[in-house]
Image (cartoon, rainbow, N blue to C red):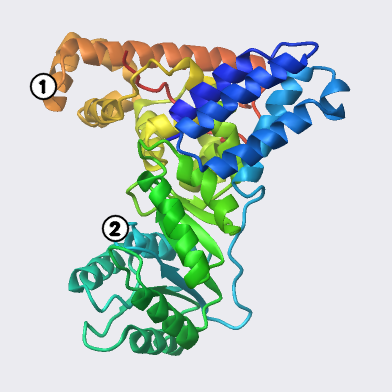
Amino acid sequence: MFETLGERLNTALDGVRGSGNLTEDQVKKVTREIRMALLEADVNYGVVKEFVGNVRERATGAEVSKALSPGQQVVKIVDEELANLMGGQASKLTFASRPPTVVMLAGLNGHGKTTTAGKLALFARKQGKSPYLVACDTYRPAAIEQLQQIGREIGVPVYSEGTEPAPEEVAGRGVRAAKDEGHDFAIVDTAGRQVIDQDMMEELKRVRSVTRPHSVLLVLDVVTGQTAVDVAKAFRENADFDGMVLTKLDGDARGGAALSVVSVTGRPVKFASEGEKMSEFDYFYPDRMAGRILGMGDVLTLIEKAEGQMDEEEAEAQSKKLMAGKFTFEDFLSQMQMIKKMGPLSGLMSMIPGLGKQLKDVQIDDRMLGRVEAMITSMTLAERRNPKLLQSPSRARRIARGSGSTQQDVQKLVKQFGEMQKAMKQMGGKGGKGGMPAGLPKGAPKGGMPKMPFKR
């Protein structure tokens, strides 16, 4: 979402990164370019004005003049102000001391509210909670059916009474049912509308009064741009909420809404949804997002994603095999499947510092993982465990037929795998017995990453 904005901001900052001394004219120029970049990204005008003012004031102040590298200090200031613009620190849910914790979702139709209910339920279960969904959109049978389908998919019960009762009646009985059945996390999916109207606001107040939620979250589709900001302002004025969920952060919009809503509403973004999978949902970290926008990466999130897919013992075992040159195609397949679960490759690459800028002209094709997986699964168990067998042309032809690829593709994969084995064995020798090579960040996933498939 923030690719264009990131490119524009980095272009603006390139002129000062290496500067030993900053002139007033340089500061004016860079802040003028930052202002244009934010306005083109559809950021609210008032928000842009305040942001640029803060950057200019800090860039001409003592913290820059006393810095060893004034140019880099300005980059740091922009990074910090971007994080502040989006809330500064992560704002996480607080759970009730006497369960169930009740979370009420609000928002317009089409902003992803029902899908968010399912994602939040799955997220809560990962936190050790027992979630329960309450379907209160009594105006749309399709919305109830969608929530029930999501519930079946993720294995979470859904309370529904159809379309006859009033939403607040369903909400009240649903929360009581959650408590009676021993669930400690109830999610109330309220009814939306196509546009904001007073009836919806009054209805939300009644649902809120009956359920007494511990948290009210407004779901916003950031692809709608300034419309999302207007929606947030209207809900803030008429039906108060304490946090927001931003959906479709993986979209192609300019990102202005994501940078504006906190300043406009005075409420934090609590969650971000960056994909269609139920698992692609997490707390929103303003500082990490600022780093991604400026091409500084987001290593912490990348590590968390990797740790979520592989336990420590398995990672340690694969690390030792990799460094000893005993890593097989069977291990390769396991890690590749782990990477697929972590999300789109383009998103993962943006989390690695500096890599997004280097690969801006490279087309990252997620389908390549599927093609490589097809070749590996077409191998026999013996071939996966002993890649030397694959030097046989007849074996390569058989695998090509079974995977819908060419013999040359198979031979290229085998060659690249051999090169990776050799390189990792050499690195393992330099880094110590079975250990990680020197220089990797503390907390980095021990299993290592296979070579990613790109194409120009």
Q: Position of residue 431 (x, y in %)?
A: 66, 19
The residue shown at (26%, 29%) is 367
Q: Is residue 449 visible?
A: no
The residue shown at (58%, 26%) is 34
> Which amino acid type is shown beneath numbered disc 2?
Gly
> Foreground: 434 or 155?
155
Q: Is residue 294 above or below residue 304?
A: above
Name the residue tied to disc 1: 401
The residue shown at (45%, 38%) is 42
> Which amino acid type is shown beneath numbered disc 1?
Arg
Q: Position of residue 276 (x, y in %)?
A: 32, 48
The image quadrant that residue 345 belongs to is: top left
Secondary structure state at the residue bearing disc 2: loop
Mark 2 or mark 1: which is in front?
Answer: 2
Q: Quadrant of the C terminus?
A: top left
Q: Position of residue 350 (x, y in %)?
A: 48, 29
> Foreground: 197 or 391?
197
Question: Number of marks in the image?
Answer: 2
Q: Earlier in the sequence, mark 2 or mark 1?
A: 2
Count residues near mark 1 (Cα–Cα under 10 Å), then give few for <14, some for 14-19, many for 20+. Answer: few
Q: Which mark is residue 110?
A: 2
Whether residue 223 sits left or right of residue 263 in the image: it is left
The image quadrant that residue 19 belongs to is: top right
